[in-house]
């Protein structure tokens, strides 16, 4: 496999406008994400930016960034546009899609996505789950739950469904972490398809892939990475950075 890591980012976030450039311990958030991806060492890393100021920030930090159409409707559209620009010859057969709002994501989590694709030739898309943070996650619609057929080692499983609904029973639930590893053809097939009925019902893009018949597998991470979606998340990220300093 020859993976490439692409990080979609745009300034017009609804709940936290301008968040890619939000300062976290003296470093723009998108630069922190880029550096974590580089540390995984699984392939070249680039930011698929929707705005020139993001490109400037990444390049100023010594990174690679591609300016994409700001009107693109989703992160997967943005990474496909960047892929077409960076690799028109198709050298990279695996694309790791890392969200630009995970400034402390562990490099090992990205490696786990690539490892799943290498270990399972039937896997079209690899992703990540983490244990629930509390029992309240089970009924929280903002927490996306993954239903998995787990492997015997408990380190990964085949995805059966994803939902925002409450999951019942005594067993813990898996929280989905929005990191994906696509085989290149799976990314092309996914982007070429219209939103599916289950995707529209649950408001979860990954269900489109499942309705297309693509096989998803998920690696288990010890904890969900800190994700910055709103001002309170940003403050928590700043406090976390301060503890690391």
Image (tube, rainbow, N blue to C red):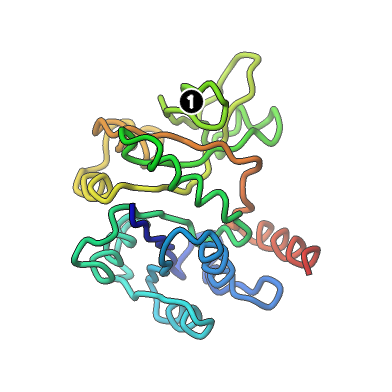
On screen, residue 132 versus residue 79, left or right, reads right
Residues 204 and 124: in front is 124
Residue 215's spot in the image, x, y percent? 32, 32
On screen, residue 16 versus residue 118, left or right, reads right
Residues 233 and 115: in front is 115
Q: Check disc 1 and report its element: helix, strand or loop.
A: strand
Residues 3 and 170: in front is 3
At horizontal 55% and vertical 48% (from top left) the residue drawn is 109
On screen, residue 2 versus residue 110, left or right, reads left
At horizontal 45% and vertical 84% (from top left) the residue drawn is 56
**Residue occupied by mark 1:** 147
Q: Residues within 10 Å of mark 1 (few under 14, many from 20)?
A: many
Quarter of the C terminus within the rendering: bottom right
Above or below for 147 versus 53: above
Residue 144's spot in the image, x, y percent? 52, 36
Residue 115: quadrant of the picture: top left
Residue 232's spot in the image, x, y percent? 69, 58
Above or below for 197 versus 235: above
């Amino acid at each position: 496999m020859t993976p490439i890591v692409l990080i979609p980012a745009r300034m017009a976030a609804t709940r936290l406008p301008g968040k890619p450039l939000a300062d976290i311990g003296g470093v723009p958030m998108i630069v922190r994400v880029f550096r974590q991806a580089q540390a995984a060492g699984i392939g070249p890393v680039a930011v698929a930016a929707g705005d020139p100021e993001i490109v400037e920030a990444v390049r100023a930090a010594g990174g690679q960034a591609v300016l994409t159409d700001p009107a693109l409707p989703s992160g997967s559209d943005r990474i496909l546009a960047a892929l077409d620009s960076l690799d028109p010859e198709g050298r990279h057969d695996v694309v790791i899609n890392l969200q630009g709002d995970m400034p402390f994501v562990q490099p090992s989590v990205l490696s786990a996505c690539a490892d799943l694709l290498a270990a399972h030739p039937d896997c079209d898309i690899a992703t990540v789950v983490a244990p629930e943070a509390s029992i309240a996650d089970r009924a929280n619609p903002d927490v996306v739950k993954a239903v998995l057929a787990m492997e015997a080692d408990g380190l990964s499983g085949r995805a059966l469904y994803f939902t925002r609904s409450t999951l019942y029973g005594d067993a813990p639930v898996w929280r989905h972490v929005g990191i994906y590893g696509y085989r290149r053809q799976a990314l092309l097939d996914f982007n070429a398809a219209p939103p599916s009925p289950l995707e529209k019902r649950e408001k979860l893009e990954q269900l489109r892939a499942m309705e297309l018949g693509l096989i998803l597998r998920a690696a288990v991470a010890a904890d969900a990475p800190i994700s910055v979606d709103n001002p309170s998340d940003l403050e928590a990220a700043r406090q976390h950075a301060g503890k690391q300093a």
